[in-house]
Image (spheres, rainbow, N blue to C red):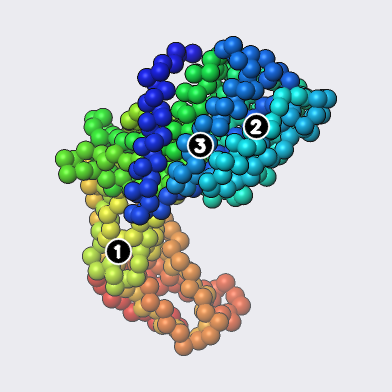
Amino acid sequence: MRPFSSKNFFFINFLLISLLLVGKSASAQEPVKKVRFLFVLDCSGSMLGNIDGKQKMIVARQVLARLVDSLNNVPGVEMALRAYGHQSPDKDCKDTKLEVGFETFNAKEIKERLKTLHAKGTTPIAYSLEQAAGDFPDRRATNILILITDGLEECKGDPCAVSQTLQNKGIVLRPFVIGLGMSEDYSKQMGCVGKFYGVNTESEFRVVLNNVIAQSLEKTTLTINLLDVNGKPRETEVNMSFYNAKNNALVTNYYHTLDGNGKPDTFKVEAGFKYDIEVHTTPHIFKKGVEIKPTVHNLVEIPAAQGTLKFSMANANENGTIKCLIKKNGTSQIIYVQDINTTHKFLIGIYDVEILTLPKIKINKIQISQSKSTPIIIPENGVLQLSYYNAIDASIFILRNNKMEWVVDVTSQQGNGREVLNLQPGSYKIVYKLKDAQHIIESREVSVSISSGSDRSLILD
């Protein structure tokens, strides 16, 4: 691991103090999000060993006591302490207890309880994590679990599976593991539990613990570049959703904008874990497993080249709302439903369109290009008014390439009716019979031609 310096230590402490001061000034302007820290402390017999010439248990108590003091007045912070292996010298695989529950300003209680904890028993990590699930009052906060240990599971449990369950259920947002005297090799076994840090000196322990706290409290900056077809960050004006990649829980939403200089805005997000980012273009774009690193500015680039599709029809409002189905080329998958006489953005590519006029209009392989508008002009409908004195069964067909294509059925159980149909220009045949007709030879047929803007009337008798 990278060496720790006194400069790093003083920087982290300065950051914590700054967070306290900034939090106080900001609290009057905006609500402070609640952050809960659950410290799970290993008090098994192995903690009687030494690290950096001092007993591990003593080092853990002292460093943790100083940390909770520094967090005591940070706005929105609640702390709790769970220990394991401290109640029985025997191999008791249920030896774990919540010693101090979640409260604000409870550093004094935690410090007093730390003084009474002594290393004795075994290491039931998985069981302790299971019990920790009930320590958090709810999920309406950033719940952080910090496991401080010097050994591996000794009770045949599966800490990895338990930790994953806690994260999948959204009980714990981020788990951290600090290994006292454990080399980086242990990261292969403990890294599945949470972000693993191996420390070998007291000063390293202090720095790592402070660093974990700092990155949990402080948001980091992020810029999302939505790239056009030329790789330039010029696409914008779209909502973005951020999900926790571990459990798919929605974390936050932002509407992408460009600043006064035409550059993507920078905003703040919680760091230290991975996001799945959904960009709500049409169709949506998903970028999975995006790791947002703390204490640095993060830049994420997502190809999102778009053009527009515009449907136009004269006097469309007189015919009611006409829907246009946009589909992925070559499939029946509907990507978007667009109204007539509107414009909408789509990712560049090839689409198929089905326009719900009578009859339907199908247009395949429509190309959407970068920053260009693709117009689709639909002929204006004509109006056909059908009147009938008796109950009827009728089908309307359009003649195309000397073929009869079905358009719509008109049926009525009663006479003296009237139907008004908005039809696309073309030659139609209406095949019908009276409702009480019993023989095929009683079928009737009438032809009618419809042109744009025309108004035709027919009586079916």
Q: Quadrant of the C terminus?
A: bottom left
Spatial CA span between label 1 and label 3: 81 Å
Residue at 28 percent across and 58 percent down: it is 342
* Left or right placement of residue 34 versus residue 450 in this view: right
Type of the residue with mark 1: Pro
Type of the residue with mark 3: Asp
Residue tagged 3: 69
**Picture disc at residue 425:** 1
1 or 3: tag closer to the N-terminus: 3
Report x, y in % for residue 293.
41, 29
In front of the other: label 1 or label 3? 3
Provide the secondary structure element on which disc 2 rests. helix
Q: Residue furthest left?
A: 261
* Left or right placement of residue 408 versus residue 95 in this view: left
Q: Is residue 351 visible?
A: no
Above or below, 115 relative to 137: above
Residue at 25 percent across and 39 percent down: it is 264
Residue at 38 percent across and 51 percent down: it is 27
Residue 62: name its quadrant: top right
Circle 2 Cα neighbour tier, 10 Å, few/some/many (<14 / 14–19 / ≥20): few
Residue tagged 2: 115
Report the front residue among 50 and 230: 50
Spatial CA span between label 3 and label 2: 14 Å
Report the front residue among 97 and 336: 97
Report x, y in % for residue 303.
33, 33
Spatial CA span between label 2 and label 1: 89 Å
Residue 3: name its quadrant: top left
Type of the residue with mark 2: Lys
